[in-house]
Image (tube, helix red, strand yellow):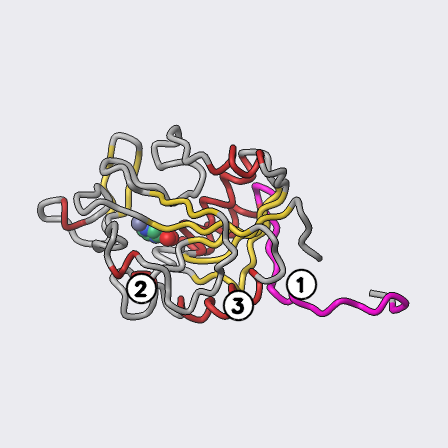
Amino acid sequence: MRPGPDDCLLVIDVQNDFMPGGALAVPHGDEIVPVVNRLARVFSHVVLTQDWHPADHVSFAANHAGAEPFQMLALPYGQQVLWPVHCVQGTAGAAFHAGLDVSHARMVIRKGHHAGVDSYSAFLEADRSTRTGLAGYLREHGVKRVFLAGLATDYCVAWSALDARAAGFEAVVIEDACRAIDLNGSLAQAWQDLAAAGVERIQSARLLQPKAEPNQPN
Ligand code: VGL
Ligand code: ZN
């Protein structure tokens, strides 16, 4: 499997607050950084996303009297998990992990910036109608297949992969370049939803293997 000009690597939310010690730490989240760096080198087209919330964001438990993190709340657009305050615009927690080495990334999509709407997906906010513009951007650049890496597998990566499919792209999640939050079975549910939507699941080795010799079967 060799990425070509129709392929894009979409790197989801490799930000300090999702790293061990961060405000919404994803277990072992830091382990993906070298994998993402290696992967990015085999893609000419890389897009990064950044979770980017205002301090008064509706997804923060602290903004709802009496609410605790990880509890559910019914909002006008549906059920919302309430999270610890994380990835507040301009803070160190919202910055990319210092080890992320993807300087050739051409585009950064910031999502979750509307105070009243969350956005796990890089394509479509949680109201399921507000678009980020990423689908149009990818189409204008001739992208047909999106490979996904980043945090967290069961939230922002999964929702982005499902929406990539819905927008007409092929989508491939690179499992070992992601880590999960896994809240109440969310990881198993995500893999089930991804498979049902026709999202492919691979390991990074499929993309990183050295070129085969011309006369060797592979
Ligand atoms: C994410 C929960 C809240 C993610 C972002 O990047 O997966 N999860 N905000
Ligand atoms: Zn968030």
Residue range of the region highlighted in magenta in the rendering:
196-216
For the C terminus, the quadrant is: bottom right
Mark 2 to mark 1: distance in Å?
28 Å
The majority secondary structure of the magenta stretch comes to: loop
| Residue 95 percent location from the top left of the image | 32, 58
Reply above or below: 110 against 87: above
Give whichever of 41, 103 is nearer the camera.
Answer: 103
Indicate yes or no whether the magenta region holds residue 156.
no
Helix, strand or loop at label 3? It is helix
Q: How crowded is mark 1: few (under 14 residues within 10 Å), some or many (20 or more)?
A: few
| Residue 22 percent location from the top left of the image | 27, 65
Q: Residue 35 carries which label?
A: 3
Helix, strand or loop at label 2? It is loop
Mark 3 residue type:
Val
Image check: 147 left or right of 55?
right
Q: Mark 3 against mark 2, which lies toward the viewer?
A: 3
Mark 3 near ligand 1 (CB under 8 Å)? no
